[in-house]
Amino acid sequence: MVLVRQEGDAASFRVHVQPKSSREGIVGEADGILKLRVTSPPVEGRANEACLHLLARALDLPISRLRIVSGQHARLKTIQIAAASADLIRAKLLAIINKSSHERNL
């Protein structure tokens, strides 16, 4: 299960981003860290932007509420979501991971 922390009125969690992938999506979790693939290369912040867009779409949130608070130049990043409940984000991520896992097994 993805480790989501409550920090005041924001929730945060860690992601591992694989840039320049052939497909984009949330591929699962390992050791409490969400695993993502993005097609954008890690230059000029394009992979970071793709990561935030992917998460905003998946969580059905405006991208303006998401930001990378650490790991700007690394594959391992910490994402913070403003005005969010850790419990709600955890539940949404679990549903996304379960759906993605189910679709891979079909």
Image (spheres, rainbow, N blue to C red):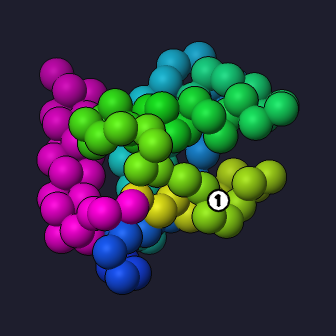
Looking at the picture, tell me which residue is in the foreground, 59 or 26. Answer: 59
Please tell me in which quadrant of the rendered image residue 101 appears.
top left
Residue placed at 47% from the left, 62% from the top?
A: 80
Q: Considering the numbered disc 1 on the image, is that residue within a helix, a strand or a loop?
A: strand
Residue placed at 37% from the left, 70% from the top?
A: 10
Looking at the picture, tell me which residue is in the foreground, 52 or 15. Answer: 52
Left or right position of 93 against 15: left
| 58 is higher (above) or lower (below) than 83 | above
Please tell me in which quadrant of the rendered image residue 70 appears.
bottom right
Can you give x and y, in whole percent of width and height, for residue 20 in the image? Answer: 69, 25
Q: Which residue is mark 1?
A: 76
Left or right position of 59 against 69: left
Residue placed at 49% from the left, 24% from the top?
A: 24
Which quadrant is the N terminus positioned in? bottom left
Can you give x and y, in whole percent of width and height, for residue 106 in the image? Answer: 16, 22
Left or right position of 65 against 38: left
The rendered magenta stretch, by its main secondary structure, is classed as helix
| 75 is higher (above) or lower (below) than 5 | above
Q: Is residue 32 visible?
A: yes
Residue placed at 48% from the left, 32% from the top?
A: 53
The furthest residue to the right: 43
Can you give x and y, in whole percent of width and height, for residue 17 in the image? Answer: 60, 45
Kind of residue at disc 1? Leu
Q: How many marks?
A: 1
Looking at the picture, tell me which residue is in the foreground, 98 or 51. Answer: 51
Can you give x and y, in whole percent of width and height, for residue 37 in the image? Answer: 54, 34
Left or right position of 90 against 4: left
Magenta range: 82-106
Q: Is residue 2 visible?
A: no
